[in-house]
Amino acid sequence: MNLKFAYWVPNVSGGLVVSKIPQRTDWTFDYNAQLAQTAEQVGFDYALAQARFIASYGAEYQLEALSTVAALAPVTERLKLIAAVHPGLWHPGVVAKMGATIDFISKGRFCLNVVSGWFKGEFTIYGEPWLDHDERYRRSEEFIRVLKGMWTEDDFHFRGDFYRINGGWVKPKPVNQNPHPEIFQGGNSKAARRMASRVSDCLRGDKMV
């Protein structure tokens, strides 16, 4: 087994922990650029920027994940950059285009973490419906199937319960990553594990170094 190491990008305030103890991490881009370069130098393989839109566990300030990894690409050379997204708040066709762009800029280092969502307030504050647990994973599975189709086909059609694609494509395609950027998925439930076995490259639980 080829062991690889990843770290949570502190792109939100609060130190990524539920604690009232003052944290010494910073959420700013300058700090994150320095941290990514250090992680690269000491041998980390991945950096994961989380998706957060409103305050939770002290995360009053948040840098959006896709924008953050796009900005980290030019200041790193080897580190693979994972951005988290929530189906329901993003359309997979838009994410496919953004991901392909970041992958092109980073020369093949973009990855995606699809998070089905646990924080109801992040959906309701934007007027989006809050689906039942297993329905959120059904939507995420369609989301990933659309991503893969858009990244690998030139005339992609999809008709699901949540998404419709009528001859979609993105150019430039992602840099060859056998055959698309790595797709990570968050979750611990049976629904998460079953879905991951069908469409994801890696299932991420609650723990990451």
Image (cartoon, rainbow, N blue to C red):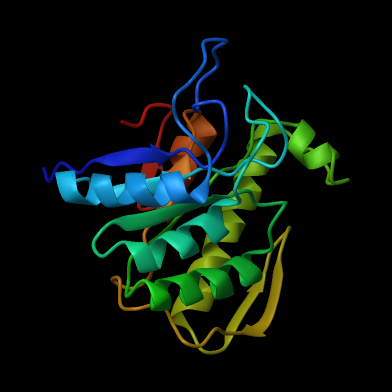
Number of marks: 0
Q: Is residue 158 above or below residue 199?
A: below
Most foreground residue, 197 or 86? 86
Q: Is residue 113 visible?
A: no
Q: Quadrant of the N terminus?
A: top left
36 with respect to 93 (left or right): left
Say left or right for 41 vs 117: left
Q: Residue at x 35, y 63 (%)?
A: 75
Residue 6, by quadrant, is top left
Q: Residue at x 51, y 89 (%)?
A: 154
Quadrant location of the C terminus? Answer: top left
Q: Nearer the viewer, residue 93 or 75?
A: 75
Q: Is residue 65 left or right of residue 162?
A: left
Q: Between residues 81 and 195, which one lies in front from this camera angle?
A: 81
Can you name the residue that lies furthest to the top here? 20
Residue beneath the point at 42% across and 59% down: 72
User: Please, which residue is most extreme toward the left here?
Assistant: 1
Q: Residue at x 34, y 44 (%)?
A: 35
Q: Position of residue 119 (x, y in %)?
A: 69, 31
Give coordinates of residue 156: x percent, y percent.
57, 82
What percent of the width, then of the height, locates residue 190? 49, 30
Q: Residue furthest right?
A: 127
For residue 114, above or below residue 158: above
Residue 116, percent across and down?
Answer: 60, 42
Image quadrant in which you'd find residue 177: bottom left
Q: From where the camera sits, is residue 141 visible?
A: yes
> Seen from this angle, which residue lies furthest front?
30
